[in-house]
Amino acid sequence: MVDRTHIGRTLPPHSANVEAGRLRLFAKAIGETHPEYTDEGAARAAGHPALPAPPTYVLCLDFDAPDPYAWFAEFGIDIARVLHGSQNFRYFAPIYAGDRLTFASRIEDVFQKRGGALTFVIKETDVTNQHGVRVAELRATIVIRDNEGGQE
Amino acid sequence: MTRAFDSVAVGDALPPLMLPPLSRTTLALYAGASGDHNPIHIDIDFARQAGAPDVFAHGMLSMAWLGRMLTGWTAQQNLREFGIRFSAITQVGERITCSGRVTEKLERDGERLVRVEVQTTNDAGEVKLVGDALIALP
């Protein structure tokens, strides 16, 4: 069971590259057709030094950690019982293809609702680029359904 | 495209973004592109074992659609904060509409900002994601 002793724990930091090809695939997956997100020439014409990463893409690179769900296992969380409750982004500087981002996460809070049927884990992640500039802060609420409630 | 702070009023609606019915292909593409390989979104056997009737959409796919609506309305570098709560699961076959509305104009740290309330809904009007964005406007 996830308990409050995990509050304040940090997860191992990791780094990931923002790749133009992957940005194009992401644009395709979300149906983004604005050329500044897929075409370097259009991106430069719009004043960007390279393809920009769309607003939510930065979270995707947090999944590029060698084993992004390792902390679930370590905390005793069954991935089949996990729901994404909420997600917040704060943006401080743009993110472009060619950047290398470093993700440093910590567990901000753990609490329960509905008599323990639901456990909430708040994870905050600071993202900095290769110049040491803080580009974004991510805050995720992970909801874990009780695994003693029997068959659903 | 430059949208000026003074040209925006509380209550203004953003142009909605209407998506085609959600396909399994989109879920597979999104899993690969996003790096979120949680099998519950792409493997129906796994989803059923977990008690779900079918695979269902990554919440972050819907948030990315909301992001498209926002960056279609204002330049992305104006986006300061973007947060949402997932209130219902988006199922395969559902047709999702992203909508947004200006709810507040404010000033913070010398910047003029507008708060935009955003949501995704299906054809029946069921709200799937709800949240808001803070956008700096010149």
Image (cartoon, helix red, strand yellow):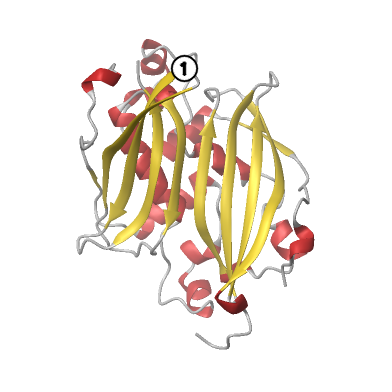
Residue B11, image x and y in percent? 21, 37
Residue A73, image x and y in percent? 73, 64
Q: Give the answer, above or below, for where B57 lies relative to A42.
A: below
Tell me the amino acid under the disc marked 1. Gly
Q: Quadrant of residue B53?
A: bottom left
**Point 62% across, 79% down: residue:** A147
User: Considering the image in quadrants, where does the N terminus of chain A appear?
Assistant: bottom right
B16 displayed left or right of B41: left
Please name whichever residue, B61 or B130, is drawn nearer the observer in this view of the structure: B130
Residue A38, image x and y in percent? 39, 27
**Point 55% across, 76% down: residue:** A114
Pointer 1 residue: B110
**Does residue A29 show up?**
no
B29 displayed left or right of A113: left
B8 displayed left or right of B136: left
Residue B15, image x and y in percent? 20, 36
Does dot 1 land on a helix, a strand or a loop?
loop
Q: Quadrant of residue B13?
A: top left
